[in-house]
Image (cartoon, rainbow, N blue to C red):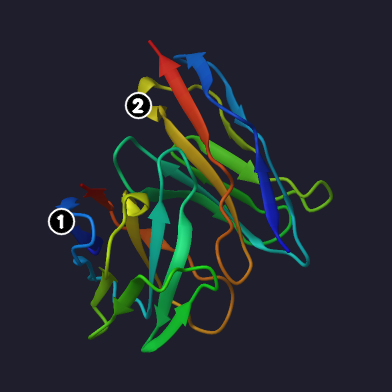
């Protein structure tokens, strides 16, 4: 089945220790998104890639970076995690073809714990 | 800018009861409208969508109609099951998804 895959599902890191979360997709979608979702809150968009073009949200901290080496994979790098970065991180993908609204499909998420 | 208001939860109801979750939005133009569902510990799943006025989205017994005149997209299900217990997010899309705060639904046997 075509899908969005996130690994690992659970990640524990230490305060200040860089961590990378990964997302892959078999949908051949040209847009990939990263969201942060804290407990009992709505997801918050951090950034997205439209093909190779990186689009950062204005209020995303510099501590968060992303890489997209190819169509299928996208990574979220947190350079120096703080306690406030503990959250569920959701990857989503969509196909944007220039007309209409692209529908986003989400992965299962990675829950990050910062000790 | 855009904003979306969902009814507050938790909404607790018994199995086979009728469910309504209200959602209203403010927006310029006519955004596409989405409902996503999030089961405990999981990511979001697309539940249904509508892209223009008077469209009705439906899936798994859930329905929502795009009401331009009232800027609403209320979610309904005629007979809920315990497995419908989840958090439901209303999300207009205009350039990007604008999620509501989410409504937790708890269905008891």
Q: Position of residue B13 (x, y in %)?
A: 51, 15
Dot 2: element: helix
How many numbered discs sit on the rendered protein? Answer: 2
- Left or right: where does residue B13 sit relative to residue A64? right
User: In this orientation, which residue lies closer to the viewer: A19 or A15?
Assistant: A15
* Label 2 with label 1: CB-CB less than 8 Å: no
Residue at the spot 66% in from the left edge and 54% down from the top edge:
B55
Q: Which residue is mark 1?
A: A8
Q: Position of residue A50 (x, y in %)?
A: 42, 83
Residue at the spot 56% in from the left edge and 52% down from the top edge:
B99
User: In this orientation, which residue lies closer to the viewer: B107 or A111?
Assistant: A111
Judge depth for marks 2 and 1 and give the one in front: 1
Residue at the spot 32% in from the left edge and 76% down from the top edge:
A66
Mark 2 on the same chain as mark 1 = no
Q: Split into 4 quadrants, where in the image is the N terminus of chain A?
A: bottom left
Q: Which residue is mark 2?
A: B83
Q: Position of residue A51 (x, y in %)?
A: 38, 86
- Left or right: where does residue A39 sit relative to residue B42? right
Which residue in the rendered view is the most extreme toward the right?
B69
- Callout 2: few (<14), some (14-19), or many (20+) C-alpha neighbours within 10 Å? few
- Left or right: where does residue A111 sit relative to residue B12? left
Dot 1: element: loop
Q: Chain of mark 2?
A: B
Q: Is residue A47 above or below residue A110?
A: below
Quadrant of res B64: top right
């Amino acid at each position: 089945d075509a899908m969005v895959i996130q690994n690992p599902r659970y990640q524990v890191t230490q305060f200040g220790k860089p961590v990378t979360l990964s997302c892959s997709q078999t949908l051949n979608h040209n847009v990939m998104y990263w969201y942060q979702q804290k407990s009992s809150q709505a997801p918050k968009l951090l950034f997205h890639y439209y093909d190779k073009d990186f689009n950062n949200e204005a209020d995303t901290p510099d501590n968060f970076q992303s890489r997209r080496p190819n169509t299928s994979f996208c990574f979220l790098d947190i350079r120096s995690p703080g306690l406030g970065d503990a959250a569920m991180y959701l990857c989503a993908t969509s196909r944007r073809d220039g007309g209409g609204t692209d529908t986003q499909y989400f992965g299962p998420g990675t829950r990050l714990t910062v000790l | 800018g855009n904003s979306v208001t969902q009814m507050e939860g938790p909404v607790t109801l018994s199995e086979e009861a009728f469910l309504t979750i209200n959602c209203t939005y403010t927006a310029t133009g006519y955004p596409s409208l989405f409902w996503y569902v999030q089961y405990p510990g999981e990511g979001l799943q697309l539940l249904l969508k509508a892209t223009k006025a008077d469209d009705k989205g439906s899936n798994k017994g859930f329905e929502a109609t795009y009401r331009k005149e009232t800027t609403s997209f209320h979610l309904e299900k005629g007979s809920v099951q315990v497995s419908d217990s989840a958090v439901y997010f209303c999300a207009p899309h205009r350039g990007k998804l604008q999620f509501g705060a989410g409504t937790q639904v708890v269905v008891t046997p």
